[in-house]
Amino acid sequence: MSEITLVVKNRNEVRLFRLGLYWGDLLSEDGGAERQAPQSQDDLVNRLIRLLPRGYVVRQDQRTALARKLWSGRLERPEMDLCIYVDQVEEEGGAQPAPERDLAKQLEDCRRQREEAEQGRVRAERELKALQGPAQSWKKQLETAGRQLVEQAESVARLQAERDRLSRECEHLERENQCLRSQLIELTTKKRRSPGAR
């Protein structure tokens, strides 16, 4: 839905401002969530006037043309922009409001915030790309380290199995050695006790 453009003429200067007003705001009474169709041309224009910032009024010579333009079918084509010509007025007591400066400041703030958001998005994308390279490298390093740990675990398991096998063989050889030693002692003893031994 198109935004309504506010045309401000002040001291022979014409400036355009976008106020964040949309066609739907005119169809919604006082900006409420429940929309109700305007009952007349004047009702439609009055709704628009209530949405204008403080210190702005619709030019008198524009009211009739504006009402006719709104009522004659412009609302059926919300994609079309609408320019509203307004004048600045003085508040009671003679003080001159500065809505134009306020609008300019709001627009500048919005523009700066949009630029900062865009810069933040670009910076985040750049940082993400910068991290993707190291992340891939870290992933490969972790995969390599994981494979090495598995290989080391398998090697340790094989060494432990070989150690257990050698330990069993050593125990077996030790038993055989003791048996042979016992037999040797027994034969030596019998030989000493034989009648022909000296």
Image: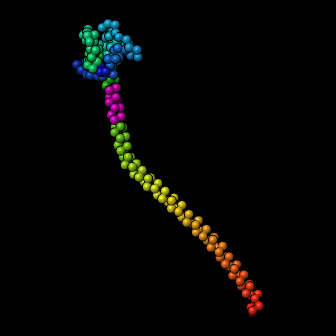
Q: Can you give x and y, in whole percent of width and height, for residue 91 in the image?
A: 35, 14
Whether residue 63 is visible to the viewer of this picture, yes or no, is: no
Within the image, what quadrant is residue 169 found in?
A: bottom right
Please tell me whether residue 66 belongs to the stretch shown in magenta.
no
Q: Looking at the picture, does residue 124 appear above or below residue 157?
A: above
Within the image, what quadrant is residue 41 found in?
A: top left
Please tell me whether residue 109 belongs to the stretch shown in magenta.
yes
| Callout count | 0
For the point 66% across and 73% down, the residue is 175
Q: Can you give x and y, in whole percent of width and height, for residue 54 in the image?
A: 35, 16
The answer to whether 174 appears left or right of 152 in the picture is right
For the point 65% across and 75% down, the residue is 176
Q: Quadrant of the N terminus?
A: top left
Q: Can you give x and y, in whole percent of width and height, for residue 97 in the image?
A: 34, 18
For the point 46% across and 58% down, the residue is 148
Q: Quadrant of the C terminus?
A: bottom right
Which region is colored magenta?
106-118
20 and 74: which one is in front?
74
187 and 106: which one is in front?
187
For the point 35% across and 11% down, the residue is 37
Q: Looking at the picture, does residue 151 appear above or below residue 28?
A: below
Task: Characterize the magenta stretch by its predominant secondary structure.
Answer: helix
Residue pushed farthest left?
12
The coloring applied to the image is rainbow
85 and 48: which one is in front?
48
Q: Can you give x and y, in whole percent of width and height, for residue 44 in the image?
A: 32, 10
Whether residue 41 is visible to the viewer of this picture, yes or no, is: yes
